[in-house]
């Protein structure tokens, strides 16, 4: 199954809403254009929902900030830190965020578990 087929499947799933955006206008695209953090604010999501944020660190950083600005609590936001992993088996000690090891305790964390995002985010 390719990416387009997966998106079609998600879009058709009951109770599932897919909102797509691209950073820059592109020929053949007639959907939303704009950065994810701004688009999330435009969508004005229901504050009773739980949010999963994954992608490049800079996008995660600004999306989490935007969600917080909208009123989401750290307990409602989950994100993934797999880009910090090196050995992936708990030996190198290079993936830690505070007392947590991304490779052993994550890579998905609830935002309040992290305290704050690592510097590269
Ligand atoms: S990636 Fe090496 S200890 Fe986690």
Image (tube, rainbow, N blue to C red):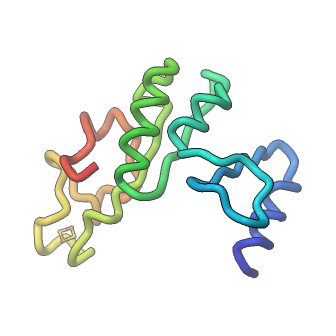
Quarter of the rendered structure image containing ligand 1: bottom left
Residue 35, given in percent of the width and then of the height, sits at: 54, 45
| Above/below status of 47 relative to 7 | above
Q: Is residue 50 above or below residue 60?
A: above
Residue 24 % position (x, y): 59, 55
The image shows residue 82 at horizontal and vertical percentages of 35, 64
Residue at the image position 34 percent from the left and 33 percent from the top: 112
Which residue is more in the foreground, 118 or 93? Answer: 118
Tell me: 90 left or right of 104.
left
Count of numbered tags: 0
Left or right, 54 with reference to 1: left
Q: What residue lies at 82% left-to-right and 55% top-to-bottom? A: 11
Apparent side of residue 63 relative to residue 115 in the rendered image (left or right): right
Residue positioned 58% across, 29% down in the render: 41
Is 94 drawn above or below residue 31 in the view shown?
below
Q: Is 98 drawn above or below residue 108 in the view shown?
A: above
Give x and y (percent) for residue 110.
40, 41
Quadrant in the picture for the N terminus: bottom right
Q: Nearer the viewer, residue 100 or 79?
A: 79
Residue located at (60% from left, 38% from top): 39
User: Which residue appears farthest toward the top when viewing the image?
Assistant: 71
């Amino acid at each position: 199954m390719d990416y387009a087929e997966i998106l079609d499947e998600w879009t058709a799933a009951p109770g599932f809403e897919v909102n797509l955006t691209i950073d820059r206008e592109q020929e053949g695209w007639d959907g939303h254009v704009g950065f994810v953090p701004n688009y999330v604010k435009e969508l004005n999501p229901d504050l009773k929902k739980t949010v999963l944020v994954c992608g490049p660190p800079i996008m995660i950083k600004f999306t989490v900030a935007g969600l917080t600005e909208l009123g989401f609590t750290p307990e409602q936001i989950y994100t993934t830190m797999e880009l910090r992993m090196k050995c992936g088996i708990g030996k190198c000690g290079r993936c830690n965020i505070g007392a947590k090891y991304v490779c052993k305790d994550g890579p998905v964390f609830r935002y309040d578990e992290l305290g704050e995002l690592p510097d590269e985010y």
